[in-house]
Amino acid sequence: MADLWSDYTDMLITQFDANSGKDRKISARDFLSDPLKYGSEEGINEIAESMHKDLTAFIDNSIQSVPTLKTEFESALQRCDSATTLISQAIAARAKTSKIPVIRPVSVERNTPEEIISVLESTPDVNSMIDKLTSGSYLIADFTRDVEGKKIGNWLFSGAKNYVLNIYIPYNEYKSLKDSKNELNTLFEVALRLIKKS
């Protein structure tokens, strides 16, 4: 089902259906895979809303069971935000000196492979690397994203050879749980909208 939702969300749906959802006549997986199939079921809106509420509670319980992971994630986010600010300033300064545009594109389609460089923090060596990357670039695309009010840097240095510079954030299950909760909220919202239109 990874084509309909992420692999982590798929795992949560499987766990939910095996535990909390086993007493339902419709599984969360079946409903979210093809909501229109159940559009004529009596009381489907109430069934879906109840399922959504229970699945959200299931994820919230999982989130509450990993408080140290939440702290670790928040600490990693803060580190990413600080590094992003410093590296962003370094990139802007070098780009201005070299008269290279820094843009915030909606997307970039590339046919050539790029080297991906991930760093933890801004250091003199990283700043030296930024000088080299900037000097070989025609433009710099800033794909920095916001996560819970903190910035995680991501820049494409586009030139004869493309390089991507990332601020590294380690995998964290707390973040995966939160992302899946948001993904499932959207999936249920869309499913209920489809049923109402049918």
Image (cartoon, helix red, strand yellow):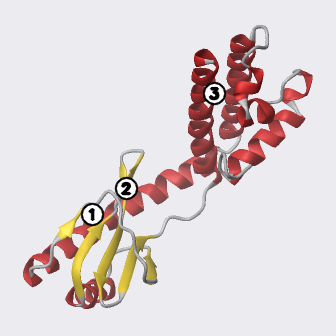
Q: Callout 1 environment at 10 Å: few (<14), some (14 to 19), or many (20+)?
A: some
Q: Nearer the viewer, mark 3 or mark 1?
A: 3
Residue at 64% over, 44% down: 177
Q: Nearer the viewer, mark 1 or mark 2?
A: 2
Three-letter code, disc 1: Thr
Say left or right for 71 vs 7: left
Which of the 4 quarters of the picture holds residue 104?
bottom left
Q: Are marks 2 and 3 in contact (CB under 8 Å)?
A: no
Q: Nearer the viewer, residue 150 or 35?
A: 35
> From mark 1 to mark 2, how far is it between C-alphas?
12 Å
Three-letter code, disc 2: Arg
Which of the 4 quarters of the picture holds residue 120?
bottom left
Disc assigned to residue 145: 2
Residue at 42% over, 45% down: 148
Q: Nearer the viewer, residue 164 or 159?
A: 159
In the image, residue 95 above or below residue 170 = below
> From mark 2 to mark 3, how far is it between C-alphas?
28 Å
Mark 3: which secondary structure? Answer: helix
Q: Are marks 1 and 2 in contact (CB under 8 Å)?
A: no
Q: Earlier in the sequence, mark 1 or mark 2?
A: 1
Which residue is denoted by mark 1 in the rendering? 85
Say left or right for 181 vs 135: right
Where residue 179 appears, as percent x and y from the top left, is 57, 45
Where residue 123 appears, as percent x and y from the top left, is 32, 81
Q: Nearer the viewer, residue 63 or 115?
A: 115
The C terminus lies in quadrant: top right
Q: Earlier in the sequence, mark 3 or mark 1?
A: 1
* Outermost residue, top side: 42
Which residue is denoted by mark 3 in the rendering? 191
Where residue 150 appears, as percent x and y from the top left, is 37, 51
Mark 1: which secondary structure? Answer: helix
